[in-house]
Image (cartoon, coloured by chain):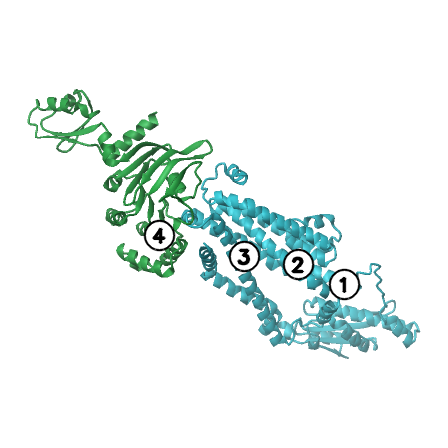
Amino acid sequence: MKNKFKYLVGASLKKKIKTKWFAVVNVLLVVLIIGLINIDTIIESFGGDFNEPTNIVVKDETGEMFDLFVSNFKQAQTYLRDPENINIKISDSDKELLIEEIDNEKEIVIYITPDDNNYIKAEIISDSYVDNILYQTITTSINTSKYTIAMAKSNIDVDELQHINTPVEIARNILDETKSSQEETMNFFMGIVFPIFILPFFMLIIFLVQMIGGEINEEKTTRSMEVIISNVSPKVHFISKIVASNLFVFIQSAILLVSAAIGIAVRKATTGSIIDLGMDIDVKNLFEMLMSSDIASKLAYIIPITIVIMLLSFLAYSLLAGVLASMTTSIEDFQQLQTPVMLICMAGYYLAMLAPSFEGSLFIKIVSYIPFISAFISPPLLLLGQIGFVDVGISLGLLVVVIYIMIKYGMKIYKVGILNYSTSKLWTKMLKAVKD
Amino acid sequence: MLKLNNITKSYGDLKAVDNLSFEVNEGEIFGLLGINGAGKTTTFRVIMGLLDADEGTVTLDGKQIDYEVTDKIGFLTEERSLLLKMTVYDQMMYYGVLKGMSKEKIETELDKWLKRFEIEEYKHRKIKELSKGNQQKIQFIAAVINNPRLLILDEPFAGLDPVNVEMFMSAIKEFKNNGAIIIFSSHRMEHVELFCEKLVVLVKGQAVLKGSLKDIKKEYRKKNIFISGKLDKDELLKIKGVVEVRKKQTDYEVKIEDEKYIDNVFEHIKKMDKITKFVVEEPSLNEIFVSKVGESYEK
């Protein structure tokens, strides 16, 4: 019987993996994941207008704005994708001549004139739309320059001016000693990032449910089930399906992880950095901050908890899918029956995304205990500090209880369901099976 | 020996099998007959352990049938229980391993049977690409690949042409000669008549007819008389004991309600002109079946 079990697991796994579609889908997935991780490099390699230098010509009628503008622009260019590719020069030519000289979308003329009431006026002239971030950077630089000039004209000396321009030192004081300000920033960041990490988990659950349902239904509708069950017990058959489909999910997860690793390696080889997004935005610092904060130590236990809760959830979903599939008589019936399961899954995913916006929500906290959904919500809530170990313990406990119930009673339903071909009095039959 | 002892199985209020008992010995082919819904498939499922009987026991060689014994059983289901997306080879490996066979043994047996059924070229073809008849051959091979001691055949000739029916019959007889216990169900009474020594006819789960084919025919009192000569159908119908007269190509088939009327019919016939034939024959199994099933339903 042990050999038969091993064979059933192997045959089931082989049936899923040794198909053209598995190969095709995974080749596409690998290419897509590597592509997504390196999407900026790919876009740049194809070229386009963004590679052309942007020329900003400043016609300064005030005679004192240009240097200030250039200096402020350099400070404000953090969010520009490629600041090295922006040339700023001053011109003495007439405004009309400068406008005539604009011959492409990458030419911008800034016309600054004195104003009696508002110190200066400015006009930004271009042939077409200007990139939004660049436009914001230009306006910020002009405003900052005006502010500096205004201060100078108000007889404030240079030292005073410097003090005014220095950013305010803000001390963050959180009375709860277990919490830190770094963590405050990181919580927000992780609240956004975590749902992205659980997206593959959501996808894998859908794979898992459809796979078990499809296979059990195929064996049932072709009546192969009768021959199989006459040689191995329904229990062995059921467990073999659960083991095979979960192994498949692990293989699929490994492929996704390897693809991501290859994508990151390619990124490192082409850009020289894993997290260089081609911007001056300080992602590196953010990452370093993350690593040095308490989040890193939190992740040390949150990652194992997440893995455990996800593995148990995979098991729960596969047991549920197996029991439901045994009750249906066609793949169409199963697809209908799996819709609520998919909706539960989606609800969990959306609540995980909403959790950071509804801090302290009692509803989300209660929902985080519910098996099948807990894997989506508990880890992010724990990371955000909205729930504690006791809550995670309750989620895990309830999940284990549900798994136990599904093994104990689901097996009885499975035994009756797999050889039942009629939908008449289906629920009565299943209830009778549970009672027996 | 396979022994069913007072098997009863109900689905809710419906008794699918009602107090059924029979025995099948080594080297015997046993017919389990009945119209659709009579309880044949339920009986097979109980024998295979797929369903638990409400009452009664099933034993093979004195032991209850469980997963220790099922490796010795071959089961051909009424519907084609094949995974159509698999190749013939993969399907046989799948079922063979589940019967506790080694992969080498499965391949040897598979090659032997594919050759015998003249379908060697389909070994690595997907089952869904095969014709219905060839799929039935594959299903038969799947049932016998383990050289079973007990062979259960539920409608084995469905979808087969006469040549292939002959091929299957020869294979089944070979198993019988080698001492296998064979249970067989079919709607085609001529097939049952050809090689079943013993049978049971089920109606609504109950055995309405049971025993050896010879005895059943002997005990069935109605007989058919085939007569040739210058005859008048209406005159024949007036003879006491005659229930039906059918004009065949050269003969008249006269059905009598009991064999005790044979002499009476003969006395009347010998007075008629140019009588060249008077042959008394036992009714076909089909006739007995239709008669018994009809009677039971009327009750």
- Residue B23 visible within the image: yes
Q: Say which colour chain A has.
A: cyan
Report whether B154 appears left or right of A20. left
Quarter of the rendering occupied by the N terminus of chain A: bottom left
Name which residue type carries label 4: Ala
Q: Which residue is mark 4?
A: B142
- Residue A368 visible within the image: no
Q: Quadrant of residue B5?
A: top left
Name which residue type carries label 1: Glu
Which circle marks residue A305 in the picture? 2
Which circle marks residue A183 in the picture? 1
- Circle 2 residues within 10 Å: few <14, some 14–19, many ≥20: many
Name which residue type carries label 3: Asn
| Residue located at (60% from left, 76% from top) | A269
- Taking depth in this image into account, of B149 and A382 the one nearest to the observer is B149
CA distance separating discs 1 and 4? 65 Å
